[in-house]
Image (cartoon, rainbow, N blue to C red):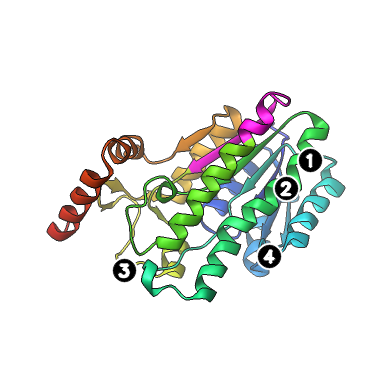
């Protein structure tokens, strides 16, 4: 049995829930954080006594610190911390209000920042650990204009994660820092954010096949067993990223043609 202690934020649904269930089946001892108490307790209850639900608002530093404290009190240490919580919004740059902008900054970026500053000192004390920040392919290739501020904040997550990884690498080689970049995933994210298109696992949306939360979680489980710096979960993503950076203008034109043709 794998008895790693793993903390997951945003664990009440979607990728976080799927990951919690898969890690629980592998023997991980879990501390699960999310705002929705009833849903979180349902997930933890389905896993068993080794899954501890902790109602957590990741936009509050004290809540994130409390999540760590519960993990240490219950299990003595943390091996893996997954910053997974977040949400999107369907607004172009020119439609965004100050409030909407600030809310996405807090939920998508500050939550990760709080998680990093909360758990990394513990990893440094132990000389080991694995921080996983769940970002998005849109943070690398901003190909959907109505995900404007979400994409911008996920891009910031990518940069902060890379900076931390480089900072730690020389002195703490056994602390792994990973960025996970899913593409389009069939979760409640799409409903909350207000996707203008139906999103179903197995269907095709633009150049990517829509993945299920379970498919993404399988890859994160593998990442925990075999750490790497960055993980694209969608097979189409690496080539799309290369196309984007080879010629941004050409890539944007091809996306516009694809949308106008309905593909």
Image coords of residue 46 (percent x, y):
64, 55
Disc 1 crowd, CA 10 A, few/some/many (<14, 14-19, 20+): few
Q: Is residue 193 visible?
A: yes
Looking at marks 3 and 1 on the same chain, the residue that comes earlier in the sequence is marked by 1
Q: Is residue 82 above or below residue 13?
A: above
- Residue 117 is labelled as 2
Mark closer to the observer (3, 1) = 1
User: Magenta includes 178?
Assistant: yes
> What's the distance in space between the residues labelled 3 and 2, CA to CA?
36 Å
State the residue position of label 1. Answer: 121
Q: Residue at x 73, y 36 (%)?
A: 79
User: Which quarter of the picture shows residue 167?
Assistant: top right
Looking at marks 4 and 3 on the same chain, the residue that comes earlier in the sequence is marked by 4
Disc 4 crowd, CA 10 A, few/some/many (<14, 14-19, 20+): many
Q: Is residue 158 left or right of residue 148?
A: right
Q: Residue at x 51, y 62 (%)?
A: 87
Secondary structure at badge 4 equals: loop
State the residue position of label 4. Answer: 57
Mark closer to the observer (2, 4) = 2
Residues in magenta, as a range: 165-180
Secondary structure at badge 3 equals: loop
> Contact (CB < 8 A) between labels 3 and 2?
no
State the residue position of label 3. Answer: 196
Q: Is residue 179 left or right of residue 115?
A: left
């Amino acid at each position: 049995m794998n008895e790693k202690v793993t903390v997951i934020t945003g664990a009440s649904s979607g990728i976080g829930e799927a990951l919690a269930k898969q890690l629980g089946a592998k023997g991980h001892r879990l501390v699960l954080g999310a705002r929705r108490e009833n849903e979180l307790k349902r997930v933890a209850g389905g896993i068993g006594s080794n899954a501890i639900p902790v109602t957590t608002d990741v936009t509050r530093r004290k809540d994130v610190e409390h999540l760590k404290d519960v993990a240490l009190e219950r299990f003595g240490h943390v091996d893996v911390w997954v910053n997974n919580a977040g949400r999107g919004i369907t607004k172009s740059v020119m439609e965004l209000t100050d409030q909407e902008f600030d809310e996405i900054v807090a939920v998508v970026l500050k939550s990760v920042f709080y998680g990093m500053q909360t758990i990394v000192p513990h990893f440094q004390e132990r000389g080991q650990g694995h921080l996983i920040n769940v970002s998005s392919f849109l943070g690398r290739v901003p190909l959907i204009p109505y995900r404007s501020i979400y994409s911008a904040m996920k891009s910031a997550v990518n940069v902060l994660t890379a900076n931390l990884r480089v900072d730690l690498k020389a002195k703490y080689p056994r602390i792994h820092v990973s960025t996970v970049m899913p593409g389009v995933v069939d979760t409640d994210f799409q409903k909350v954010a207000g996707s203008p298109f139906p999103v179903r696992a197995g269907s095709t949306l633009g150049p990517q096949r829509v993945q299920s939360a379970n498919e993404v979680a399988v890859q994160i489980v593998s990442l925990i067993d075999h750490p790497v710096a960055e993980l694209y979960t969608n097979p189409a993503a690496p080539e799309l990223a290369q196309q984007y950076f080879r010629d941004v203008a050409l890539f944007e034109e091809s996306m516009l043609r694809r949308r106008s043709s309905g593909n």
